[in-house]
Image (cartoon, grey):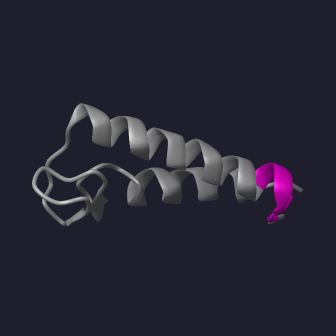
Amino acid sequence: MNDWAAPLIASALFAFLSPGMVVQMPGKNRPVDFLNMKTSLPSIFVHAVLYGLLLILFFVVLNIHLYV
C-alpha cells in the first residue's frame, strides 16, 4: 500500500497558498488582499514560510497518512 497523504496535502497547499490565488499576505494596499492574481516578493516569502510550517504541522506533528 502506498501512502498518498504527502503528495495530496502538498499539492493542495501549494495550490491554495500560491500568492494571489486565494489570498495575498501582505497585499499591495492592505495587509490582506483576496483574489487579486498578483504577487510581490514579500508575499512570496510569507507564503513560502506558511507552506513550510503547514507541511511540518501535517507530516511531523500530526503524522497524517492516507493509504490507498
Instruction: Specify whether residue 64 is painted magenta.
Output: yes
Task: Give the x, y percent position of residue 25.
Answer: 31, 54
Indicate the position of residue 46 as horizontal and vertical percent values: 41, 43
Q: How many marks?
A: 0
Horizontally, residue 51 falls left or right of residue 33, namely: right
The residue that appears at 20% across and 37% down in the rendered structure is 40
Placement of 16 over or under 49, stated as above or below: below
Residue 32 at x, y = what percent?
26, 62
Which residue ends up furthest to the top in the rendered image? 41
Residue 4: tell me if it is visible.
Answer: no
Q: What stretch is highlighted in magenta?
A: 59-66
The answer to whether 24 appears left or right of 52 in the picture is left
Assign the C terminus to one quadrant of the image: bottom right
Tell me if I can see residue 42 in this picture.
Answer: yes
Foreground residue among 19 and 1: 19
Q: In the rendered image, which quarter is residue 42 located in?
A: top left
Based on the displayed image, in which of its 4 quarters is residue 52 positioned? top right
Which residue is at a point 53% across and 47% down the rendered structure image?
51
Image position of 65 (left or right of 41): right
Q: Quadrant of the N terminus?
A: bottom right
Q: Which of 8 and 29 is in front in this view?
A: 29
Residue 16 in the magenta stretch? The answer is no
Task: Name the magenta segment's main secondary structure.
Answer: loop
Give the residue drawn at x 46%, y 50%. Answer: 14
Q: In which quarter of the image is residue 39?
A: top left
Q: Position of residue 23 (x, y in %)?
A: 29, 62
Q: Residue at x 62, y 58 (%)?
A: 9
